[in-house]
Image (spheres, rainbow, N blue to C red):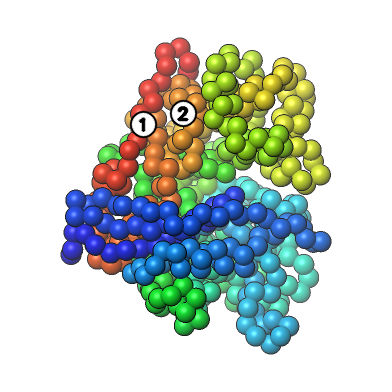
Amino acid sequence: MSAAGGRFAAADLGASSGRVVVGSLTPDRRVELGMVHRFPNQPARMEDGLHWDVAGLFEQVLEGLHRAGPVDSVAVDSWAVDHGLVGTTGGGTRGLLHPPFHYRDDRCQRGVERVHAKIGPAELYRINGLQHLPFTTCFQLAAEAPGWLEAADRMLLVPDLLASWLCGVEVTERTNASTTGLLDPLTRGWNLDLMRRLGLPTGLLAPLVDPGTRLGSLLPAVAERVGYSSEVVAVASHDTASAVAAVPAVSYRFAYISCGTWGLVGLELHRPVITEDARLAGFTNEGGLGGTTRFLHNVMGLWLITECLRAWGAADDLEGLLAEAGRLPVPVGLVDVDDDRFLAPNDAGRGTMPDRLDDWCRDHALPVPTSRAGTVRLVVESLAAAFADAVRRAAALAGHEVEVVHLVGGGAQNGLLCQLTADRVGLPVVAGPVEATALGNLLVQARVAGLLGDDPAELRAVVARSTVTHRYLPSKGRR
């Protein structure tokens, strides 16, 4: 096995932006990253609801691969649960039948009602082990318009859909499949009996593959567009699974927070925790690299700040607002960042995010922030409290000792959030890497190329050598 070499491209698609990152392994076993293309990911509001512009995203991925130049392999990761229905189009060709719906679309609630009419929440948790989120794929499929599922012969999650456009192979990668509510968390296979009970066509499900599976070469038209031929591989295509794989932990006694639009807070375990206590606490069991379980709770994340900045027209003011917010006193009370009222975007007819935060304070007899910095402090303090609570609950539910919290993703750049989280959880918080998802994606590709072994500790040691992290210690008297 070679100790260095290879050149790999990660198409890393987030809920608000995407990027194509190139990486290679150096002789001293570090990953050198290069950002070759970054682009926004804006949902499209159509007559029937909120959708993703996946065709536009694919064009941006192709542009990024063109800018990257020749690479040994390519892999796609993205957010979870959303999917495209593939079949024979009106023109008689095979393709995407409709633009994929956005998980923040209002239709999801009717899917919840239809599923729970057949299988109650407690039984459903015993079957799939997933935290109740109204946009889980099984609920979305149950909410599809009449005739849509019958017209399709495949349901492909977003990264699998784009990978199929790259190489022509239709599969579902297992870590992302684990977010659909249709995977058995013990056997890690599709639960066809659940599909039948919900009245969903089992033929929609594509064959499952594990991270590290070679899918095939770029299609001729794609190779011509980007300027070279390359291999397409499956990685841990759920972005959180790739991010957790790139946590630079040195022992098993850690918790993680993958913080971006969402804050995914939890533990890496060898087996799922499917108990009534875990269900009531809102914890989910999703697949991780190497057959691990990501036992975690979904917290709303930086979405609240992003939408506040968008409402204020102050996207470039975050650094100054955080500095000002850090000088303010601890808020009298905190908001519940997981409240459903904060799920919708500003333009969904439910008021702007700052207005909804003010309303929450009024409804709960708390002081309403009197400045933008005050709102930011309230949100960041509330996020830190939610993160700390999720770490403690996860440890208690799993009987797992935690000595350190690793915070990766974009939130690692938010020093105030990292410090407040350390204060509230009473443990050191190690911030970084920011590009954890891209790193996890690229390192699995390096494994496929034979440059790294299968030991997760080896992969994490490479991450640690490749990343500058910052350690935040809890302040006395803040827990």
Front residue of 234/394: it is: 234
Circle number at residue 300: none
Residue at image x 73%, y 83%?
Answer: 90
Element under label 1? strand
Residue at image x 59%, y 50%?
Answer: 16
Question: What is the distance, in whole Å, between disc 2 and disc 1 at their CAs?
Answer: 9 Å
Residue at image x 57%, y 38%?
Answer: 301
Inspect the image, locate mark 1, and give the three-letter code of the amino acid beneath it. His
Residue underneath mark 1: 470
Residue underneath mark 2: 415
273 shown above or below 27: above
Q: Where residue 364 sits: x, y (%)? A: 74, 22
Inspect the image, locate mark 2, and give the three-letter code of the amino acid beneath it. Gly
Residue at image x 74%, y 42%?
Answer: 346
Q: Where residue 114 sits: x, y (%)? A: 74, 58
Front residue of 10/267: it is: 10
Query: In the rendered structure, which disc, 2 or 1, sits on the residue that comes first in sequence?
Result: 2
Q: Where residue 198 sits: x, y (%)? A: 67, 64
